[in-house]
Amino acid sequence: MCTGRLDLSFVLRAFSKGADAVFVAGCHLNECNYITHGNFHALTMVYLGKKLLERIGLNPQRLRMELISGGEGTRFAEIMTEYGKQARELGPLGTGEGIELGDLKFRLEAASKLVPYLRLVERERLRVPLRTEADFDEFFSSDEFNRLFDELVGDKLAISQILLLLKEKPLSTGEIAKNLGLTPSDVSRHINTSSRQGLVRYDVSRKCYSLAL
């Protein structure tokens, strides 16, 4: 499969199904076999995926991409041996980070719900004319990218987590803040945004928030 088809939903589904690490191998940049240059897209998806994993408390090293040609069998074997060892050192997904199974599933589900939005963000705000792997490394480790990610994705992830919590049962601002490790003021800000979008409502009698039906 061409890496141009890589979607973060594939990666997050693999982790949700129990994978401890995900490895993506693609053609060298500017050497696309299909002249689609899908490996540029894949590399962007991997960088976004690593940042998203980090944001939900998972080690970003659990996702890796290498650019390898069909004639580099020895190099491929060496990389897989090395990454297999690294994956074992990271330990089981969640356990290696000190995250309980139920919490792990919750974090992955919240992240998965952002995938359609991330596709849009990538197309409109993060698709930059980079041509080398070094360019990608520089941009996706820059303060500019971190700012954009926080601005475009950080709040959306928090809202996704809040909506998942409210799907289980109505909660107060304080209860949501305690569950997610957020400040009550941040929760209020996210709740207000969700309320304006018609996603949540305030139950006056119970003094808590619930999903808008």
Image: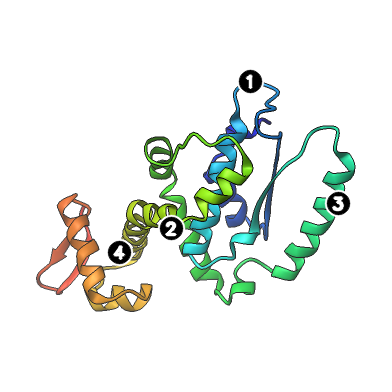
Looking at the image, tell me whether mark 1 or mark 4 is earlier in sequence order. 1
The residues tagged by marks 3 and 4 sit, at their Cα atoms, a distance apart of: 47 Å
Write the residue at 56% across / 45% down: 136
Q: Which residue lies under the disc numbered 2?
A: 143
Q: Secondary structure at mark 2?
A: helix
Write the residue at 49% across / 70% down: 103
The residues tagged by marks 1 and 3 sit, at their Cα atoms, a distance apart of: 28 Å
Looking at the image, tell me whether mark 3 or mark 4 is earlier in sequence order. 3
Quadrant in the rendering for residue 17: bottom right
The residues tagged by marks 1 and 4 sit, at their Cα atoms, a distance apart of: 46 Å
Say whether residue 134 is left or right of residue 189: right
Write the residue at 15% across / 52% down: 196
Query: What is the x, y in percent for residue 36?
Result: 59, 23
Q: Secondary structure at mark 1?
A: loop
The amino acid beneath tag 3 is: Glu
Q: Which residue lies under the disc numbered 4?
A: 166
Query: What is the x, y in percent for residue 203?
Result: 14, 67
Q: Residues within 10 Å of mark 2 (few under 14, many from 20)?
A: few
Looking at the image, tell me whether mark 4 or mark 2 is earlier in sequence order. 2
Q: Which residue lies under the disc numbered 3?
A: 78
Q: Residues within 10 Å of mark 3 (few under 14, many from 20)?
A: few
Q: Which residue lies under the disc numbered 1?
A: 35
The amino acid beneath tag 1 is: Ile
Say whether residue 137 is left or right of residue 191: right
The amino acid beneath tag 4 is: Leu
Query: What coloring was used for the rendering?
Result: rainbow
